[in-house]
Image: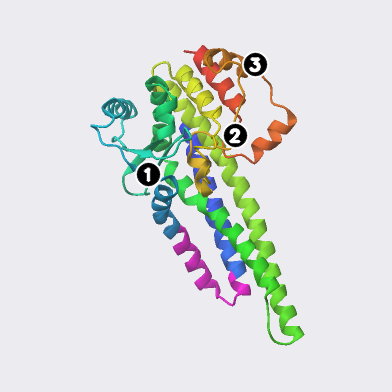
Amino acid sequence: MYRLKLYSTMALTLALFIGITTLAIVFIGQYLGIGLYTAVTLAILFNLFQWILAPKIIESIYRVKPIDETQEPRLHRILASLSNKYRIKKAKLMIADIDAPNAFAYGSIFGEKKVAVTRGLLNRLNYDEVEAVLGHELGHITHRDVSIMMGLSLLPTIFYLLWRYSLYGMLFSGYGGRDDRDSSGAIWLAIGAASLIFYILLNLILLGFSRLREYYADLAAATKVDNGPRKLMRALIKISEYRPTKKSGSMSYGGFKALLISDPDTTINISDPYNIDAAIEDISRKKLSLSDRLMELFSTHPNLINRIKRLKELESNE
């Protein structure tokens, strides 16, 4: 039943994105003098192109490369065992050469699926916790939401860039008479306003879907990994308490932050970093404030308190 709900949500999200994107390109195309059929064709080609291109962009942003089995034999065995439990082909194991602990699943819509862990994750988590993280990422693969998120993650950013570009268009529009400048400026104003509206609308839809799919991936890991809820809770807290040092620096995660297991821009404070189980109990007793709830609406990931509470419920029902 839970998969039916997830797949229905994915189908609705995909339909909304394609419909809104097509409407946006048609609307903007009219101001730029592009015909209806040409605009619709461009919209279709644009969606297909960014789906194909997304995996290469991800690998470039996160500096991803394959992990040889001789380098991490235990990690490969864990992934193979989990893949058997999920009854899927073993994903290609990758490593992202960044210090922040995180992980993500990605791949082309028709081709090979890949699971990447960061170097920081392997340094910070033990193998039991990494197993839960891999279980979470395989949940995304078995739910088939990876390709949808990869494709859709680009779209809001592109409309944001178009909005920024239209601002320059308004500043430097027209070199003829005053009427020409006014007309050109009005066109760029309309394009900019439309782009900003479409950016906000697409982003809110994407954020809501992104949070939902994280809950389902948590559920998958909790049920497929032995003692999954506890292992995943420990992993999430260790990931969320990480703060980049001056030496490690920070990086921009681009439009693909939603693919990560945890929001890299959100950190938590725990009283005793050496007692993660005590931190789990402490966090599970907390309540979200109104500001927390509002911030969650604009986040790619559910609030950690909500994730821990749900995993605690799953653990108590085991």
As drawn, the residue found furthest toward the bottom would be: 177
Look at the picture and state if 53 lies above or below 116. Answer: below
For the residues labelled 2 and 3, say whether their Cβ atoms are less than 8 Å apart: no
Please tell me the numbered disc located at residue 285: 3
Image x and y of residue 17, in percent: 55, 53
Specify whether 288 is left or right of 221: right
| Residue sitting nearer the eye, 124 or 193 | 124
Position of residue 68 in the picture relative to residue 267 (left or right) = left
Q: Name the residue under label 1.
A: 64
**N-terminal of the two: label 3 or label 1?**
1
Which of the pair 108/100 is nearer the observer?
A: 100
Residue at 51%, 18% (x, y): give it.
314
Q: Are marks 2 and 1 in contact (CB under 8 Å)?
A: no
Q: Label 2: few (<14), some or many (≥20) within 10 Å?
A: some
Q: Please tell me whether residue 193 belongs to the stretch shown in magenta.
A: no
Q: Which amino acid does label 3 sit on?
A: Arg
Q: Mark 2 points at which residue?
A: 266
**Magenta stretch encompasses residue 38:** yes
Q: Which of marks 2 and 3 is in front?
A: 2
Q: Which residue is drawn at 55% across and 41% down?
A: 209
Confirm whether residue 58 shows in the render.
Answer: yes
Which numbered disc flags the more N-terminal residue, 2 or 3? 2
Indicate which disc, 2 or 1, sits on the residue closer to the N terminus: 1
CA distance separating discs 3 and 1? 38 Å
Q: Position of residue 228 (x, y in %)?
A: 43, 19
Q: Which amino acid does label 2 sit on?
A: Thr
The answer to whether any part of residue 1 appears in the image is: no
Q: What stretch is highlighted in magenta?
A: 29-47
- Secondary structure at badge 2 equals loop
30 is higher (above) or lower (below) than 51: below
- Tally of numbered tags: 3
